[in-house]
Image (cartoon, grey):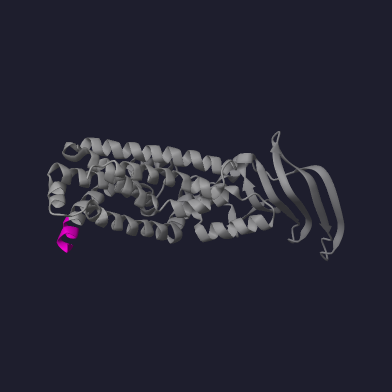
Amino acid sequence: MMILNRFLLKHFLRILSLSVGAFIGIYLLIDFFEKVSDFIDYKASAGDYLTYLFNSIPFVFVQILPLSILMTVVLTLGILGRTNEVTAMRACGVSLWRIVQPFMLLALGLSILLLTLNEFVVPLNARALNNLLDIKLQGKQQLSLKRNELWFRDKNRIINIKVADPQNQRLHGVTIFELDDSPKIIRRQEATQADFKNGQWTTKQLTENRFDPTYGDLLKIESLSNQTININRKPEDFAQQAAQNETLNFRQLLNMVKKLDQEGIDSTRQRVDMHNRLTAPFTCLIMAFLGIPFALQRGRNSNIALGIGLSLGIGVIYFILQSLVSAFGYSGALPPIVAAWTTNLIFILLGVWMLLSVKE
């Protein structure tokens, strides 16, 4: 049986390597031509190009691996079916499960690998790419993110924002510290929530504390209603912070959800992303399982071009469905855990139904 495992895995790994290499190459080529103007305009150095390449490969790898596994399973079993090697193995008493068992175990191992990469490696790559493309090349001001909060300086003011929601044009937990030339804090403004309306940030309730510039003693506390806050930023300027979810792993998202819940801030988007950190890696296992009946149903009529097209089509359908269900989760129409696992469950059931229809 070890000989059979080596025979099957040899075919599988060869096609998987070619698929992964081809997908990464195509992805990087398209992505690079989209961004090459930024590299040229901002006179990027050779180190910047290497940094982009080094950090893009792991980031792309975790995205294309499930599709590569699906294509590999379809092509491997399709090729073995065309050459009657599957028929020969079945004639020798080898069951269908025994034939696909090495593929499924390898897919499980790759799922665990992706889970590890998503937890420890990919967030670091995502942060490095954001720093290179948005801050270094495009010259955008870096918004410091400390403990999931935003800090930035605007002239003689330091502004802290607990959570930015650019999609709904809303900020949560806004604190503005105004400094003198010393520098000492002479005024502090606090607002639980601020909304962007008619080109400016407004809040229903603003608490303002004034301090003595010499000794720092509290002089006055005012509670003001329906006030305008000068933040000197538009909602789209906080899109970088909203995209920080991509740079957070499961544990960091879990801590962020707990903190937002304690502060009474909606954490739906973070919950969906948190559950997606667990579901995404196991797409490899599901795609491997789904590829088995697709390949075996064709038998000797398997075609390489058809297998590639079929795999790409399934991958596109999966991506569209997952994006749609996640959008329902972000909007609150579906519970976060349901939004994260629904697509995988649908494809598992589809694979089971097709596998049962394969003739023994």
- In the picture, measured across the screen, residue 117 lies left or right of residue 306, that is right
The image quadrant that residue 32 belongs to is: top left
Left or right for 141, reference 3: right
Left/right placement of residue 9 relative to residue 355 reads left
**From the image, which quarter does the C terminus lie in?**
top left
Of the 4 image quadrants, the one containing the N terminus is bottom left
The main secondary structure of the magenta stretch is helix
The front one of 221 and 335 is 335
Residue 6 among those drawn in magenta: yes
261 shown above or below 315: below
Q: Position of residue 218 (x, y in %)?
A: 85, 61
Q: Residue furthest right?
A: 220
Residue 270 percent across, percent down from the top left? 56, 51
Which residue is found at the position 43% from the left and 46% from the top? 345
Q: Residue 250's x, y, as percent?
A: 50, 58
Along the line of sight, the residue nearer the viewer: 141 or 99: 99
Q: Residue at x 64, y 55 (%)?
A: 260
Q: What span is colored magenta in the figure? A: 1-7
Q: Is residue 296 visible?
A: yes
Instruction: Between residue 265 and residue 343, name the one nearer to us.
Output: 343
Is 233 within the magenta? no
For the point 15% across and 61% down, the residue is 3
Q: Residue furthest top?
A: 198
Q: Position of residue 49 (x, y in %)?
A: 37, 50
